[in-house]
Structure formats: structure tokens, C-alpha cells
Image (cartoon, helix red, strand yellow):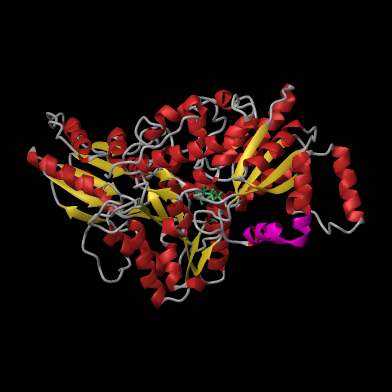
Amino acid sequence: MEARVAIKTPLLDQIRTPADLRKFPESDLRQIADELRAETIDAVSVTGGHLGAGLGVVELTTAIHYVFNTPEDVVIWDVGHQCYPHKILTGRRDRIRTLRMKDGLSGFTKRAESEYDPFGAAHSSTSIASGLGFAVGRDLKGKTNEVICVIGDGAMTAGLAYEAMNNAGWLGNRLIVILNDNEMSIAPPVGAMSNYLTRLLSSKEYRKLRRLGQEIAEKLPHPIEVAAKRAEEYARGLITGGTLFEELGFYYVGPVDGHNMDQLIPVLKNLRDTDLPGPVLLHAVTVKGKGYAPAEKSADKYHGVATFNVVTGAQDKGKSNAPAYTKVFAQSLIDEAKRDDRIVAITAAMPDGTGLDIFGKEFPDRTFDVGLAEQHAVTFAAGLAAEGLKPFAAIYSTFLQRAYDQVVHDVAIQKLPVRFAIDRAGLVGADGATHAGSFDVTYLSCLPGFVVMACGDEAELRNMVATAAAYDEGPIAFRYPRGEAVGVDMPEHGIPLEIGKGRILREGTKVAILNFGGRLVEALKAADDLAGKGLSTTVADARFAKPLDTKLVERLAREHEVLITLEDGAIGGFATVVLNHLVRNDLIADGLKVRPLFFPDRFQDQAKPFDMYTEAGLNAAQIAETALSALGAPTLEQPARA
Ligand SMILES: Cc1ncc(C[n+]2csc(CCOP(=O)(O)OP(=O)(O)O)c2C)c(N)n1
């Protein structure tokens, strides 16, 4: 890597916690923010991670910790991907270059990490609901601290945010919500809410309210004055209707320039010092990637980056020999969609992450980015399926959790043929436990009528896309891991698989490894290791957790001394389906040792995927060890691995 530019941070060097920050005069805050921005850029250039969002809130972060008495005053960052500057100011600067690494700082807010992270996150739109919980709890306990939630305009498109605002407006507890409006989600935001916020910033009515906002910046009126002022404005015809936020019971303040300390500090002080009892929404306008030209210029504003060169902005993206699974999915779906015009695709604010940006270029009218709204995405897909279309809902395993009742109630019970393309199955590395795709096989395999597939390589993924496109009987899901695929030869077109039929890749006699999903390569390596010990090993790929290939399972159980099930998911998934079949049918004969391998019963912190899989006991050497110890044979010498 090229030499790094040394940065100078004389003021930031004197700040360990917000208490140190508060000792500085207001006139130094501009420079402190600039130093904080430089430190954030430098840190992320060596760790990779979320950059654009953090750069957009440098001033807000500085101002909030300056004006409010954190950690007594509770600050909740929505999603938490913008919290790196917050971590630097709250006692974690010395570890900021361990972000997202094994034993390092989490890339999100995390309760276990700091008292300045009162509520952990990583999935979006939880800040107002949790903040309201803090506010109501505070009032019940007779405390007087503030609760401040910072939520982006992208996160503001999720139903949960509205459910919380609806409740907050009704309950009327004191709560400060800061809407960080950068007119960006990961991709440019979509939907009526985005249009609404833009109108809010530009309309005549709001230019008037903006003046009101400025007055408020000088002095926030008492509740009674607010009411009087609004009555008077209505009477004079200045206001024709309240903002959506006001209708929900919030007092709306703004818009303010979220990078201008001279605006932010007085507004926040007034919010702090006013005796307004109910919830307030401060509308701050910011620029994602602010202050770093390569980020400001890029289409996604450097939402998530690899390590990079600070001077040029060039990211160190490794070369790969195999395509990414996501890309294989997108190209396979394009191939199917060319031949079947009923195929449509849905994403919840993740067009790049799911590959639907590629699909969307080919089929703009058949691609739907519904906003950061997985629940709606699934029910919308159910409606499309009921209307006779073939919807592919492309959602990460971890985010589909949010739409579980929609999967059960709107899709499964009605037997609607929604196709679920489940990306980021298994352990995901740097994003850690909140983003691991651990539970989908468990939560889908228990649903009557669901077909649940997982691919062991990219050719299988292509075939599974074709299988899903051809299958009209009911819901069907296929899962695939994050990142680079295996590098196998690809069929030109996908070939639909027989539903419920697995395959055998290698025939042996003593040990059988029955894989489901992303550990297939490790199963084959384990078979090699075992062959080195003279143990003949069968490797089979189940392809389906549901319906299970019972004939395959029975054969493996009958013809081997050890049967290992292998999957990249939690308990209750594939192994449970296999064990259930074996036990109910008395197939565990004398002498057969069955060893289910799946994720451990704990949330695993971030690390490199290989290390996380080692910790989970699911790499080749450990699979082979499992077989050897089941047979009472001497163990392998642990081979040195990269
Ligand atoms: C439930 C859920 N779905 C998807 C995501 C992925 N995601 C992370 S950040 C983000 C965009 C957030 O946009 P916004 O709130 O405007 O914040 P910004 O990054 O623009 O600051 C998305 C879609 C998520 N974290 N949680």
C-alpha cells in the first residue's frame, strides 16, 4: 500500500470523551469537526467499512456531544453505520483502526462496547421506537435526561419508524428526533417519502417555516406560544396544513444546515433548554460523504468501502477468480426473464447489494425498489404472485427476518408462488452477528408447503434460479453465500432441478458428508483429508432442506458408519429435518454415528469469514476431525491453513 498522508489533529488529541469536548469554546468546534472528519477518513482507509454516512454526520456528532450531557443524555443512532465519528469522540479513538476486525470495535453501535451506545443497532429504523422506550422509562422513573434519536431519510421509509412516531405523538413524552436528510439511502432513495422531504425543503410554505425555524434557533417558544403562533399563522393563511410530522404529533423544526455549526449549536441548545413537553423533530440537511471529494462524487457516496488510498480515493478491491454469487444470481435471473415476461424482481433499498441494479438496467419496468421496507416487499410480492406474476423477492437472509409474518401469513398460508432469493446466507465476516444469515433455513423449513433450497456452487445457483422460475405451486426459496463463488464451469442456461432431489459428488463407503449450502467445498476438502487417512468418504449435496431427499438420506445412513450433516446455519435447520426423518423411521441403526454440524448456540462477533467458520467448527479440518472422532480413530494433525 502507498504511504499514508500524516494527519494533524491537535484539538482532537485532547479529547477522550465528550466531557473533554465540552471544555472547548464554541469557536473551536469547526476545527474539531474538521479533525474528526480527517481521522474518520484515515481510519476507514485502513479498515474499510461504512464511510459516506459517517462523514455526513461529523458536525451533528460533534454538536450533539457538545450540547447534550452524554452518556446521561441518551443518543441513539439509527442503523449505527454512521457511528464511527461518535466512537472516536466517546473513548474509542485508540481502537478505531480495529473497526470490524476480530476482537476489534464493531462497525455499528453496540451496548456491550460502550456506555455511550445505549442501544445497539445495524438493522434500520429502530431508533424512534427504542428511543420512545427510553423516554417513557425515564418519565416513569422521574428522571430528567434527554433522549435523542438520529435517523436517516432512508431509514425513515420503514414502517417501524411510523409506528413509533404514531405512538410517540400520542403518548406525548419529551423526545428529540433528528432527521438526517442527505437525500440518499445506500442508493438514491425511492418513494413518496423521499419526494415529500424534497418538497418540504423547496416549497413556499416551507421557506416560510424555515424562517420560523430560524426564529426557533434563536429561541424556542414555550408550548403556549407555539400554539398561539400557529393559530395566528393559520389565521393569516400562512400555513395551509401541517407537515406529516406535525400531524403525527411532533413539533417540527427546520430545515437546518447539518454541517453549519453556527446553526446546529443554537438549535440544539434551544431544543435542550425549552420546556416543550412532547416529541420534536429536527430536520437537518446533510451531504453523504461530506468533505471527502471521492465520496461526494461517487454514486453511492462511498456507503461501504474496502480499504483505500486517501489521496486518490482508489479502493483496494482484491482480484478474484470466480464471480460473486450475487452477480450470478442477477445474470441468471436476467436470462430467465428474457424468456418469461411474468418474472419481476423486488428489492428493499438494496439494488446494488442484491444485484438487482444489473437486472434493473435490463428490465427497468419489471424491477421494484420498494424502499427500506422488507415487510412491504414481501406482501407486495405476494400480491404480484396472486395477480399471476412471478415475483423474485431478493432480500438478505438477515433482513428477511423482519418480514417473517408476511412470509408466513401473506405468502405461505395462501400458497402463493413468491420466489425468495436469499443473499448473504451464512457467516458474513466484518458486519458481524447482526448481519449473519443464520436463521433462514430454520424459519423457512418449518413452514408447510415451502420449498427451501441452498446452492453449493454457482452452477447450482443458476439451476436454482431456473427451478424457482419454473415452479408455480407455492413459495420457494434459494439461499447463497456472500462474496466470491467457487469457480466451477457454468451452464449456459439454468436447468430446473427435480424438486426434492439431491446429488452425490463423490462415492465412498465409510463416512458420508451430507452438505446443504455454502460448505460444499469444505466437505470435499474434508473428504480429501479423510482419504489421506484411508477413510473412503461419500460427499452428497442435499440441495433441498424441504422437501428432503429422503431416499438419499436413507441410502447414506444405510451404507456408511458415519453420517455428517453440514450446513451454514443455526440449529433447527437442515440437520433437524434430516434427524427428524432418521429418528421417526428408525434409520439410526446400531453402529451408525450421526453427527450434525451447524452454527454454535451463540452470536458470533465479526472476524474474517474463515476464522468465523473455524470458530463455528465448520471448516474442512474440523469436519474431518468430527468423522475421525466418531470412529474413535486418531485425529488429523491440524494442517496449517491460510
Ligand atoms: C432492515 C434493514 N434493511 C436493510 C439494511 C441495509 N442498509 C444499511 S444502511 C441503509 C441505508 C440507510 O439510509 P439512510 O437511513 O438514509 O442513511 P445514510 O446511509 O444515507 O446516512 C440500508 C438500506 C439495514 N441496515 N436494515
Q: Position of residue 431 (x, y in %)?
A: 41, 41
Which quadrant of the rendered structure holds the N terminus? Answer: top left
Looking at the picture, tell me which residue is in the foreground, 479 or 314. 314
Say if residue 576 shows up in the picture: no
The total number of labels drawn is 0
Q: Position of residue 252 (x, y in %)?
A: 75, 47
Residue 400 located left or right of residue 608: right
Residue 84 located left or right of residue 561: right
Q: Is residue 450 above or below residue 639?
A: below
Q: Position of residue 333 (x, y in %)?
A: 39, 67
Looking at the picture, tell me which residue is in the foreground, 59 or 223. 59
Question: Is 206 in the magenta?
Answer: yes
Looking at the picture, tell me which residue is in the foreground, 35 or 231. 35
Residue beneath the point at 51% across and 49% down: 290
Q: Is residue 516 above or below residue 489?
A: above
Indicate the quadrant where residue 468 lies: bottom left
Say if residue 314 shows up in the picture: yes
Magenta stretch: dominant secondary structure: helix
Residue beneath the point at 57% across and 59% down: 379
Q: Position of residue 330 (x, y in %)?
A: 38, 64
Which quadrant of the rendered structure holds the C terminus? Answer: top left
Q: Is residue 111 above or below residue 123?
A: above
Question: Is 58 in the magenta?
Answer: no
User: Bounds of the magenta span?
Assistant: 194-208
